[in-house]
Amino acid sequence: MAEAVKKPRPEFRNIGIGQILTAYRLPLAGRVSILHRLSGGLLFVFLPFLLYLFSQSLTSEISFELFKDFLSNIVVKLITLVLAWAFLFHFCAGVRHLVMDTHRGVTKEGGKQTSIVVLVLSSLLTLAFAAKLFGVF
């Protein structure tokens, strides 16, 4: 009996974030999932800053006026806008995951559609917040 030729077994290794971002083309649902984790991490890191601002705004009328002066700085407004995006996106993506827990939108096409809804809705809400923050209305 002839000796069977052994083929080398394929190697499967963990991939890094660099390979995910450059070599692999993630579906939209995968990108939304990564952004959901990123926005949650951003909110977690900035939670002490947000709580400090909230406590300063409620302490007294003088501290509220100082808070308003602090928020009038353009850099602080941009940081606030990024944090608002993180909250709104994280909220919308969280609702998407709750809907998926009811076994709706778990197909490939459903995942793509709900990802589009999350991106559009969170973008519109962030634009409305930016308009209010920068004094459009």
Image (cartoon, grey):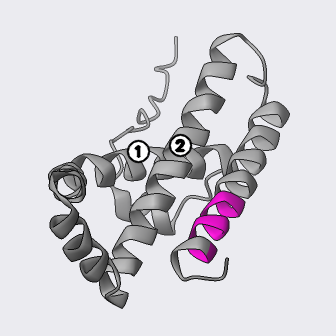
Q: Which element carries disc 1, helix, strand or loop?
A: helix
The percent position of residue 120, horizontal first and vertical second, equals 75, 57
Q: How many marks?
A: 2
Q: Which element carries disc 2, helix, strand or loop?
A: helix
Asked if the residue under mark 2 is in contact with the one under mark 1, i.e. CB atoms within 8 Å, the reply is: yes
For label 1, the crowd category at 10 Å Cα-Cα, with few meaning under 14, some 14 to 19 and many 20 or more, is: some
The percent position of residue 58, horizontal first and vertical second, equals 23, 51
For the residue pair 121 and 101, the one nearer the viewer reads as 121
* Residue picked out by circle 2: 33
The percent position of residue 92, horizontal first and vertical second, equals 61, 41
Q: What residue type is labelled 1?
A: Arg
38 displayed left or right of 98: left
**Start-end of magenta stretch:** 123-131
Quarter of the image for residue 124 reads bottom right
- Residue 129 inside the magenta-drawn segment: yes
For the residue pair 32 and 17, the one nearer the viewer reads as 32
20 in relation to 3, above or below? below
State the predominant SS element of the stretch in magenta.
helix
Farthest front residue in view: 61
Q: Which amino acid does label 2 sit on?
A: Ser
3 in relation to 135, above or below? above
The residue positioned 46% from the left and 20% from the top of the image is 3
The residue positioned 22% from the left and 63% from the top of the image is 61
* Residue picked out by circle 1: 37
The quarter in which the C terminus is drawn is bottom right
Farthest bottom residue in view: 74
The residue positioned 61% from the left and 53% from the top of the image is 26
